[in-house]
Image: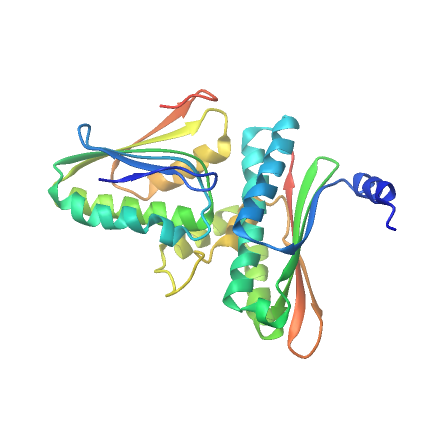
């Protein structure tokens, strides 16, 4: 069970068991990113070894540099899980027209050996 | 009594949108950030530029807050800091000023100069290297704020260090983002 409600500066983090989908959405510039993301890391540690597949949906409008580090660490864990047999796919949403958000998504993707789809969202829409 | 109308006109003449002097708490950073976002959205800028200005504001203010906490500057009465966001001829400048220990000046100067010496690709490479490093025990930030701001800036990171006394200096950092 992983369900963290969003605030102004922290994203929603939700795992949907039926769809084996982990969603991270909103804004991310917590007071302390490492503390904020700790429950997610703990969840990944126990849940990942049991999963045959997992979809990660990311729709973050803005993340600060320490959140970026945390997200990169999450993606590294998914790469490890894939090497152990979990099928992982990442769907990364960004606001259409926001070239900075697209750059960030591409930078994440270029270092990872994961199925990683970058999807523009019309302004104001959610996936 | 301070003539606030005159003060307001001075701020307007100098293109200052937001100015705050005091202790940076997380909720204050959020609230000023909201005000900034509302302003930027009203200015009809490209969304990528709104992201850059907001990102520099967050890195600046969180860097200050994290530093003030790490060095426990409240215990010596040096926790107050300044942030100013101004706009001039289509450029947005986010300036922050805070007290630092003079013994931290040389390492900080080195990191700022390193960022200023790198081109776009060099900054990206260094940024990624730093993000990949294991985080220091007890660290609140990822240690990449300066590189992140340099990547979004339209020119050099401008900074000054002014000695206050034997122990402390005042550090000012101004980061300018192109508005178009």
Locate residue A104, reporting x and y percent.
43, 39
Which quadrant of the rendered structure holds the N terminus of chain A?
top left
From this view, report whether residue A17 is shown above or below residue B168: above
Q: Is residue A11 left or right of residue B79?
A: left
Q: Residue furthest front?
A: B1
Tell me if residue A59 can be seen: yes
Locate residue A78, reporting x and y percent.
23, 43
Considering depth in this image, is B137 or A99 the residue closer to the camera?
B137
Locate residue B64, reporting x and y percent.
57, 58
Q: Is residue B30 left or right of residue B141?
A: right
Q: Quadrant of residue B129?
A: bottom left
Q: How many tags in the picture? A: 0
Q: Residue furthest bottom?
A: B166
Considering depth in this image, is B76 or A33 the residue closer to the camera?
B76
Locate residue B109, reporting x and y percent.
60, 65
Colouring used for the render: rainbow
Tell me if residue B119 can be seen: no
Q: Residue at x 55, y 30 (%)?
A: B47
Which quadrant of the rendered structure holds the C terminus of chain A?
top left
């Amino acid at each position: 069970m992983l369900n963290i409600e969003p605030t102004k500066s922290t994203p929603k983090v939700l795992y949907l068991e039926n769809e084996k989908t982990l969603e991270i959405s909103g804004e991310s510039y917590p007071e302390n990113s490492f503390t904020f993301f700790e429950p997610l890391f703990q969840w990944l540690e126990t849940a990942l070894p049991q999963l045959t597949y997992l979809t990660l949906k990311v729709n973050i409008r803005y993340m600060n540099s320490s959140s970026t580090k945390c997200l990169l660490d999450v993606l590294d864990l998914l790469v490890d899980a894939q090497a152990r047999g979990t099928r992982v796919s990442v769907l990364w949403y960004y606001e259409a027209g926001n070239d900075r958000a697209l750059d960030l998504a591409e930078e994440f993707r270029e270092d990872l050996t994961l199925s990683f789809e970058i999807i523009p969202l019309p302004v104001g829409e959610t996936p | 009594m301070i003539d606030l109308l005159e003060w307001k006109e001075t701020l307007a003449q100098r293109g200052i949108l937001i100015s705050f002097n005091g202790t940076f708490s997380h909720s204050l950073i959020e609230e000023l950030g909201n005000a900034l976002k509302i302003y930027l959205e009203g200015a009809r800028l490209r969304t990528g530029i709104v992201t850059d200005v907001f990102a520099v504001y967050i890195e600046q203010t969180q860097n200050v807050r994290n530093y003030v906490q790490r060095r426990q500057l409240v215990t010596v009465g040096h926790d107050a800091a300044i942030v100013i966001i101004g706009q001039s001829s289509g450029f947005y400048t986010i300036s922050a000023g805070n007290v630092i220990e003079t013994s931290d000046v040389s390492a900080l100067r080195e990191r700022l100069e390193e960022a200023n010496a790198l081109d776009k690709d060099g900054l990206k490479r260094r940024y990624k290297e730093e993000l990949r490093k294991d985080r220091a025990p007890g660290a609140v930030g990822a240690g990449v704020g300066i590189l992140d701001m340099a990547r979004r800036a339209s020119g050099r990171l401008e900074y000054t260090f002014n000695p206050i006394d034997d122990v402390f200096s005042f550090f000012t950092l101004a980061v300018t983002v192109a508005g178009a």
